[in-house]
Image (cartoon, helix red, strand yellow):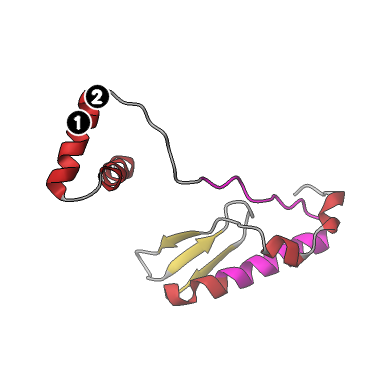
Amino acid sequence: MKKNVSTAKKSIEDYMKMPYRMVVVPDEEEGGYTLYFPDLPGCVTCVDSLDDAKTTAEDAKREWLKAAIEDGVDIKEPQEEYSGQLRLRMPKSLHRQLSRRASEEGVSLNQYVVYELGKAVAQ
């Protein structure tokens, strides 16, 4: 891991306040969940229940940061967060089809498009 002189300028608490993204992966074979922070390589922990996820993940993150600061490791700050908003241009015919299907399903056009995009990405 790279050493970085500027790491000492921030405390554990400074890093703990940063919005690091946590990924939760269900363990299909043994049950429980694996939790990790993509921006903190090797910061991984496991829990039996999602009830324990936040506390356990925060503890793991704190210990990882503590060790990284003590060892002078370069700590990557969180990647840019996404707003969840997207402006999209499409043919009028597609807009019409999507609007009609959303109406048939009894949901908003936004909800319908998000649902369909989610299905497509999952495949």
Quarter-of-image position of residue 32: bottom left
- Name the kind of residue labelled 1 in the image: Arg
Q: Does 75 appear above or below 32? A: above
Q: Tell whether label 2 touches label 1 (CB within 8 Å).
A: yes
The magenta span reads 57-82
Quarter-of-image position of residue 116: top left
- Tell me if residue 46 is in the magenta stretch: no
State the residue lying farthest toward the left: 104
Please give the count of numbered marks on the rendered protein.
2
Describe the element under mark 2 as helix, strand or loop.
helix
- Name the kind of residue labelled 2 in the image: Lys
Describe the element under mark 1 as helix, strand or loop.
helix
- Quadrant, the C terminus: top left
Return the residue at label 1. 96
Q: Residue at x 46, y 61 (%)?
A: 24
Return the residue at label 2. 92
Residue 37 locus on image (x, y percent): 57, 57
Locate residue 60 relative to residue 22 in the image: left or right: right
